[in-house]
Image (spheres, rainbow, N blue to C red):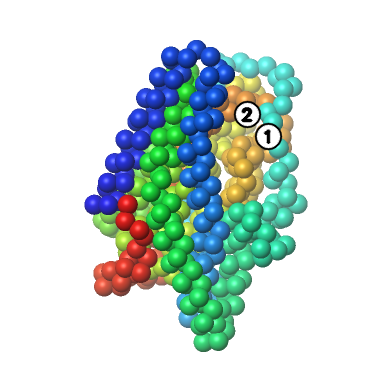
Amino acid sequence: MKSSRMTTYILVAMVLGIVVGGIVHSQFNDPATWKMFSSYVSIGSTVFLRLIKMIIGPLVFSTLVVGIGHMSDTGAVGRVGGKAMLWFVSASLVSLSLGLLLVNVFQPGDGVHKVVSGVSSGIDSHAMTLDGFIKHVFPDSSVRPMVDNEILQIVVFSIFFGVACAAMGSRSKLVLEGIEGLSHIILRVTGYVMMLAPLAVFCAMSATISTNGLGILVSYAKFMGEFYFGLVCLWLILIAVGFLILGPSVRRLVKLVQEPFLLAFSTASSEAAYPKMLEQLAKFPISPKISSFVLPLGYSFNLDGTMMYCTFASVFIAQAYDIPLSFGTQIAMLLTLMLTSKGVAGVPRASLVVIAATLSQFGLPEEGLLLILGIDTFLDMGRSATNVIGNSLATAVVAKWEGQLVTDEETTETIGEMELQPV
């Protein structure tokens, strides 16, 4: 009931935001006014996202350490991680291949006939070099990743810390109990923050629409429609595979994640949905040992929506500039994206950075990013929501493989412990 009510609030806030933004854009034919309105109204969504980022670091650390620390042997960590990576790599290949297939079928860039002008896109195409990738993955401090909200680095440190706790057995019991208490406190704080979700959704939507107007959705309707069709196809594929493994209960999982799905969609942020996903997955039911381990890994290695967008957008840009790409070149691009897109969690405008690096590597005009910058927020909404579906299914599947779909009695106890503040 509470979850359904919050979902309704978010949907209503989204519609109201679109209406208010459309009215402001149509009634005030002045870009300065649009910008001023957007800057003021976006304060609400900025506050919400900053509060979410405030709790992501300690939440990922505490839940991941507890999840690993409670595993009876360190071998289980490698086994669960291996199964998770098997799903992540398979899902990434499916996502990248689907994007590549659909962009060749739909040909959204045909007829654009752009000419290279040498204008910079403003995106750092060198941000994903090998050296930059290594530095982004492995922390040189246990504290700085928390300060900078570098999720992947937090995950790396937490894995080492959790494995050490598991290896020490009873000697680490006191530390684990303290960290577990911290996780419950952070989850309660999350409940307070989530009360602001509808306000944040309203502010984000009204700010975006007031600046760009509803016309931008019409102008890019073909590209956006084809991309979202691809996302729906990806959702169906992932859910179908989930059905084969989980059975009819996959429908209950999809229903449970509808609220974090809508939250990620309306705020264009997967991070905003992370705390709520932990709570909903516990209700499926999935053992916290699995969800607190697999979910943070998924946020770094299993960004299915981002994967599909990378191939779709890269080939679209080549089509727009009338640059033919052979089948072999496109396969090489797919494999390159498979590697460079891993570990992009926490990188600002991650998908654009990855695409910029890919364009540079394959001799495509980087300025082509300007073609999609205007609608990137709307595309990011779908990508973020898709990441929620992909990671929830990945966690459930790994839990099934590990026999960690807990009993109803254990679920009731777990939810009682992890229950958030009512909304």
- Spatial CA distance of label 2 from label 1 is 8 Å
Q: Is 213 on the left or on the right of 326, as rendered?
A: left
Is residue 244 in sight in this rendering? Answer: no
Residue depicted at x 31% and y 46%: 6
Residue depicted at x 35% and y 69%: 417
Query: On screen, 74 above or below 312?
Result: below
**Circle number at residue 123:** 1
Q: Position of residue 37 (x, y in %)?
A: 50, 25
Q: Where is residue 345 in the image (x, y as percent from the top left)?
A: 58, 50
**What secondary structure is found at the residue carrying circle 1?**
loop
**Circle number at residue 423:** none
Residue at the bottom extreme, as displayed: 170
Total labels drawn: 2
Is residue 339 in sight in this rendering? Answer: yes
Q: Is 114 on the left or on the right of 81, as rendered?
A: right
Pick the residue in front: 195 or 353. 195
| Cβ atoms under marks 2 and 1 closer than 8 Å | yes
Q: Position of residue 196 (x, y in %)?
A: 41, 45
Decide: few, some or many residues near mark 2? Use Cα within 10 Å; few <14, some 14-19, many ≥20: many
> Residue at label 2?
369
Residue depicted at x 54% and y 78%: 175
Name the mark nearer the viewer: 2 or 1.
Answer: 1
Query: On screen, 220 above or below 356?
Result: above
Residue 261, by quadrant, is: top left
Residue at the top extreme, as displayed: 29
Residue depicted at x 50% and y 51%: 52
